[in-house]
Amino acid sequence: MTRGTILYVGGLLALLAAFAFKHVLIAPPEVPAQVEAGQFDTGRAFARLERILGDQQAHPVDSPASDGVRDRLAAEMRAAGLEPRLSDAMTCNAFARNRSINCARVRNLAATIGPAEGEHLLLVAHYDGTSAGPGAADAGIAIATLLEVAEQLRGRNLQRPVTFLFNEGEENGLLGARQFLDSDPAAARVTTLVNLEARGTEGPAIMFETSVPNAAPVALYGGAVGRPLANSLSTDFYRMLPNSTDVAVFEERPWNILNIAIIGNETRYHSQGDDLAALDQRSLNHMGGQALQLTLAHTDGVEATAPGDLLYADILTRHLITLPLVAGLILLGLIFLGFGYATFRRRAWGGLLAGLSSAIGGTLVAFVLTIIVQELRPGEFWRAFPVAMHIATAATSLAAAVLCLRLARTATRSQLRVAVWLLIALAGGGISLIAPGAAIYFLLAPLILLAGILIERWRPGAERIAAWVAAIVQLLTLLPIMALVDLLLSTSPGWIGAPLAVLAAMPLLVELRPEGETRRTPLFAALGATAASWLAVLLVPAYSADRQQIFTVEHVTDRRDNSARWGIYSDAALLPEAYGQWGEWQRGPVDYARRQRWVTAAPQSQTAVPEIVKVGERPAPDGRIVTLRLALNGWDGAALQVPASADLRTLNANGERAFGAGDSDYSVRCTGRACDGFTFDLLVGSGQPVDATLTGNVPRLPDAAAPLVAARPENARPQYVPDASYALVPVRF
């Protein structure tokens, strides 16, 4: 084996190791052993959260457990130097992108410190949780952060005021944020918002959303935060997702907005696993440090008025680099033209085909292998050890790249070099058409190589040196974003990361591959690593005590046909054999939830069900106004599902809300004790009688469900929704 072949194989293994350990590049900093004056005190913040959560019960909006959390939170606010003001109102919120309106009784706690006049910084955390878990991270981490920030501001001479908002009802339709905008006088004086959130229990605190245009908030963030983690690709990508936080309400105002969250280990999110034991104090420390630094910058009078939009990315969480968006896109276009010209001059079209085949082939093979594994072991087989899936995807990408480079062995290194970088520029341009913020990841490394090509005639060897530097820079540039993608998609198969792996690895593989390589050793090494990694995917446990299977038991009473059934909300994994004693289970869609369930017949429950009473009706210019009253009859909440043919226009209950756009059915949901007797007006466009369904819910099961719960797999728990009972009741109005 030649020296070049040994280096090539060694480089492949080094690349695979880099892909396996890339998460180290975005790991949150360690909590300091000694807390210096003016530094965020993570231990004190965590202790406050322990006292607030108490026995760590689930505490959804307008529940007795939420009352206890709110009382303890108010006491901790006073202990941190804040004087809470309480707002209390039945609040409804609508969404522009769908036809749903959510309502609940909401009680916010807010406090303002600093001078009486001036531009306010609004710091936001929600204190309500879901019925599925204690919410130590979501959003206990934000509560702990804000209280410690308040402690740090105590006794300081603030140049600008700061308002702390601990709102209720975020989990049920962003209701606390809506109430704040509607009723709190401080809302009119806010100019800057920092919202804190969690979609997991660990990992770095990521600044993942800004207001638009973004130059002013990004300048504030980059200038204030010592350990930044942010990039313009993430913010563009987030806008494409259906997810929402309180920022979806606050963005109505022309504020400078920063949204920061942790997203590591989503398997514990909205479950009993979101507890204090699972909350990584390094994550709290990272979020707290950023929030404190941003607050101090505001209160010290730092201006955030830069115009326009920026491209931005952190350099290994040490510094934030920025570039005007327009300049970056123009630069990316010039890079594409430069490498296009070089590819044309060197007749390197074969190299371009090799690079393109690597990206497409690696992705397709990873996708097909994922499907095959899923047939062999149904369910979320990657859940316990997602790193196994990520390594398998990376190994597949490397094998595809080595194979394509071997097939292009007639091409010289200089031809492959420019062709591969043309492909990278092309990929960057394509991604930037959808998410312009991606351009920041396709500028620095290509420019280094172009500079080397330009000075090659005066300094022989400059191109090769520049190519090595550019390849290493490209790898270090893309590894952090790949690690963030892994965090974001930790509960999904990782084959989607294959194209990024090829773009990160190909420049180095071109430089590592010996000229005229004919030995098959590198290909065999890459294929061997791929086979071993997919074997690991097949063999590692799908679930663990830390990362458990989704498994929720439900009982459904259907008064529309006087039937009842059991439902199991889980992934596609087969149910345990013990469940066969309850009959034949069928998996498919249900009409009380969005995701599929395993379903079988169940004994009927004689419990009273919620109901809607039609109080009155009167004509209106756009149709008719129907007044309805909800009676919960012991249930925790209910949702009225109305067919699209009803043509609902607005809901009026302590304020009018218009239904959003779309062609789906309408939904009116009310959660909490105050919903018993909740009366509201619906403006109905249709003159025909409307047949709808009222779905009641309560997070408990009938006694007959005890054996089902006991037969639940060992490493499984409810997530997103708790073990619960549902009632489907016909309604006509």
Image (spheres, helix red, strand yellow):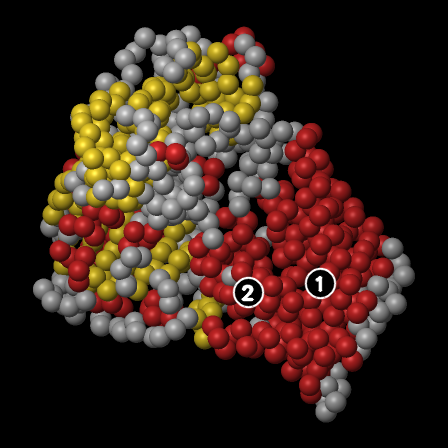
Is residue 641 in view?
A: yes
Q: Secondary structure at mark 2?
A: helix
User: Horizontally, is 646 left or right of 65 in the view?
Assistant: right
Residue type at the position of mark 1: Met
Q: Secondary structure at mark 1?
A: helix
Q: Position of residue 721 (x, y in %)?
A: 40, 30
Q: Nearer the viewer, residue 478 or 346?
A: 346
Q: Nearer the viewer, residue 69 or 86?
A: 86
Which residue lies at the image location 55% right of the left edge and 65% below the top edge? 432
Q: Quadrant of residue 305?
A: bottom left
Is residue 49 in view?
A: no
Quadrant where the N terminus sits is: bottom right
Which residue lies at the image location 18% right of the left edge and 43% below the top edge? 655
Disc number for residue 506: 1
* On screen, residue 586 above or below 265: above
Return the residue at label 2.
Answer: 432
Residue type at the position of mark 2: Ser
Q: Position of residue 629 (x, y in %)?
A: 20, 26
Q: Residues within 10 Å of mark 2 (few under 14, many from 20)?
A: some
